[in-house]
Image (cartoon, rainbow, N blue to C red):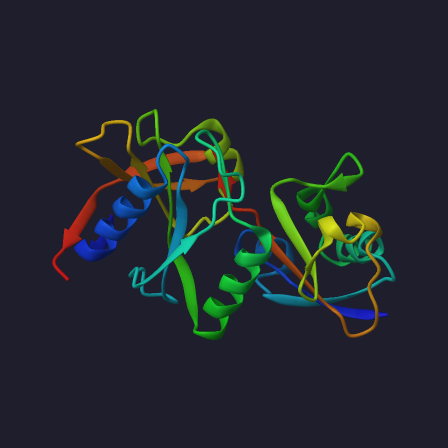
């Protein structure tokens, strides 16, 4: 189960809405071993595409080094789908390289109602998990 | 030419859980061959058909090797090689 503060959920949705129709992406870092997302980091989608996303490699190195220095890990890795449901695509599964992360998908295909779901993706196997939103 | 290589979580099964290992070589390709000798299975996770796999980012010090010759990127004594899973999808 992903337990996450409401303000962090709101921040992911706002980022996804702002970049729509391109996909938005980012990380929420949290203390190592806590499984608790805390520090919201918007990443640039180097692809600037409505169907694909990729963290800029240079920006990713900088952010991963900061997390290392702070004893943090990427607790949540999120991105948006702008025309399809919030379910991992084949490419999402092929690239998923953080077995301990919660992969959060936000769909902005409906202009009024977003859809937000969370998954573990390990060795090509996708497991959906409940999302428990707690007040900030 | 000894370098330090940072290993991401997903590849630590090949290094007995070690976060950082040392390796030798004068190019990234040689470093990866040396890693393979000591940590079998790593090369296949990094290299595909003679080029770096698109699922990983490799940096020598702070430079993304895709812009520095890929597997031919030069490394020198004391360099830090960092491997990160590329974060991407559709």
Q: Is residue A89 above or below residue B47?
A: above
- Residue B27 vs residue B20, the one in the foreground: B27
User: At which x and y percent is residue A33?
Assistant: 36, 65
User: At which x and y percent is residue B49?
Assistant: 77, 34
* Residue B55 figure quarter: top right
Q: As drawn, which residue projects farthest toward the left?
A: A135
Q: Quadrant of the N terminus of chain B?
A: bottom right
Q: Is residue B39 left or right of residue B76?
A: left
Q: Residue at x 85, y 57 (%)?
A: B27
- Residue A58 vs residue B40, the one in the foreground: A58
Q: Residue at x 83, y 73 (%)?
A: B77
* Badge count: 0
Q: Is residue A42 left or right of residue B2?
A: left
User: At which x and y percent is residue A55?
Assistant: 51, 48
Q: Residue at x 53, y 67 (%)?
A: A65
Q: Is residue B35 left or right of residue A122?
A: right
Q: Residue at x 78, y 54 (%)?
A: B68
- Residue B56 vs residue A16, the one in the foreground: A16
User: At which x and y percent is residue B79?
Assistant: 76, 70
| Residue A124 visible at all | no
| Residue A58 visible at all | yes
């Amino acid at each position: 189960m992903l337990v996450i503060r409401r303000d962090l959920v709101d921040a992911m949705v706002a980022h996804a809405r702002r970049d729509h129709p391109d996909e938005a992406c980012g990380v929420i870092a949290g203390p190592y071993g806590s499984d608790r997302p805390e520090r919201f980091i918007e990443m640039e989608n180097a692809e600037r595409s409505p169907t694909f996303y990729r963290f800029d490699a240079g920006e990713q190195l900088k952010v991963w080094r900061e997390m290392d220095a702070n004893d943090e890990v990427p607790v949540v890795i999120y991105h948006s789908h702008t025309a399809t449901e919030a379910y991992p695509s084949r490419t999402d599964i092929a690239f998923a390289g953080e077995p301990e992360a919660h992969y959060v998908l936000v769909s902005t295909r409906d202009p009024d109602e977003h859809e937000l779901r969370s998954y573990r993706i390990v060795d090509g196997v996708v497991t959906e998990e409940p999302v428990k939103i707690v007040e900030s | 030419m000894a370098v330090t290589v940072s290993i991401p979580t997903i590849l630590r099964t090949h290094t007995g859980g070690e976060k950082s290992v040392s390796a030798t070589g004068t190019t990234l390709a040689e470093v990866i061959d040396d890693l393979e000798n000591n940590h079998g299975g790593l090369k296949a996770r990094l290299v595909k058909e003679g080029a770096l796999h698109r699922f990983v980012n490799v940096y020598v010090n702070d430079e993304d090797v895709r812009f520095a010759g890929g597997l031919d990127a030069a490394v020198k004594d004391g360099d830090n090689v960092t491997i990160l899973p590329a974060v991407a999808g559709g």
